């Protein structure tokens, strides 16, 4: 049983959470909704808030890595002393990002969530005295996101379809009644789940190996490139299907 295109769904709420969390923006259209979607490059440019959010999230991680390496390895301070300074630098930079966004009257949702995640990781690292525990909440959260995406496919409610509906289809979910689009959103949701699993899997392996600084470096280097590549692939895949269907209707 499929849901009607205009009926409210739990998926709508999840999609709106994703859009707000990543600082994405619905594609603007005329009131009649007939204006075609912008080009792929324009859509990706419109959604750079997601990349900005990932970069902002990386700043506290970068502060943690640099302070831990410089103070612990470079200046040869005691391990716990260097760790405490690194924790302070990470939490402080996360708070400053939140204050900066608040001062510019931008959404602070992403920054607040970032502060919470950083604070939790800082608490775990402080309690254990091991820098690798700073990254544990992020690893588990990313794995959880991947699992939720997979479950949405199992229950035939692909989250990426809902996100597309919010971003580019004026909140409508008529893709439920379009078998080709529905299948596309099913496998695209799995693609996103896979990208998250790869990110978490690499960091999880380094966590088990006790490579604390390597976790931070990997998180910084792979997060936004994977996001951009996956988003660009998603836009291409959806536009490929919709353009093919438009061409078929025009040929009739």
Image: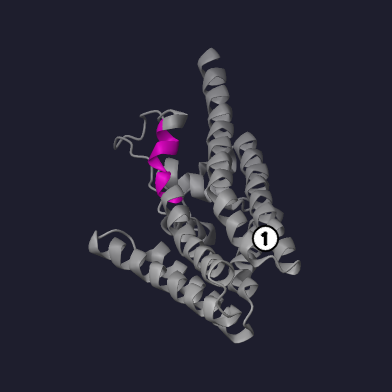
Closer to us: 230 or 161: 230
- Residue pictured at 65% horizontal, 54% vertical: 199
Tell me the quadrant of the picture where the C terminus can be found: top right
- Taking the image as drawn, is residue 138 in sight? yes
Q: In what element is the residue under mark 1?
A: helix
Front residue (pair 146, 220)? 220
**Spot occupied by residue 110 in the image (x, y as percentages of width and height):** 42, 62
Residue 35: image location, x then y, percent: 35, 29
Relative image position of residue 193 (x, y in whole percent): 66, 52
Direction front: furthest residue: 75
- Tell me where the magenta segment starts and ends, as one range: 42-50
Q: Which residue is mark 1?
A: 203
Q: Where in the figure is residue 207, as x and y percent of width and height?
A: 70, 67
Q: Tell me: residue 2, above or below residue 240.
A: below
Image quarter of residue 214: bottom right
Q: Is residue 49 magenta?
A: yes
Residue drawn at point x = 71 percent, y = 55 percent: 154
């Amino acid at each position: 049983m499929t849901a009607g295109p205009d009926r409210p769904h739990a998926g709508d709420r999840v999609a709106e959470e994703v859009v707000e969390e990543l600082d994405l923006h619905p594609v603007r259209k005329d009131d009649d909704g007939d204006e075609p979607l912008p080009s792929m490059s324009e859509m990706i440019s419109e959604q750079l808030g997601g990349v900005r959010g990932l970069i902002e999230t990386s700043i506290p991680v970068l502060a943690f890595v640099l302070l831990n390496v410089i103070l612990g390895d470079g200046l040869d301070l005691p391990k716990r002393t260097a760790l405490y300074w690194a924790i302070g630098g990470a939490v402080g930079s996360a708070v400053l990002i939140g204050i900066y966004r608040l001062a510019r009257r931008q959404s602070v949702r992403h920054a607040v969530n970032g502060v919470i995640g950083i604070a939790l990781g800082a608490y775990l690292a402080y309690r254990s005295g091991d820098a690798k525990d700073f990254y544990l909440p992020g690893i588990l959260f990313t794995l959880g996101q991947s699992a939720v995406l997979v479950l949405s496919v199992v229950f035939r409610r692909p989250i990426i379809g809902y996100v597309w509906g919010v971003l580019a289809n004026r909140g409508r979910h008529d893709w439920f009644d379009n078998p080709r689009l529905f299948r596309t959103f099913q496998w695209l949701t799995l693609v996103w789940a896979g990208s998250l699993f790869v990110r978490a899997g690499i960091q999880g392996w380094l966590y088990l190996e006790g490579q604390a600084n390597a976790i931070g470096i990997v998180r910084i280097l792979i997060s936004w490139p994977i996001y951009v590549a996956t988003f660009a692939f998603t836009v291409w895949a959806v536009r490929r299907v919709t353009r093919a269907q438009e061409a078929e209707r025009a040929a009739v």
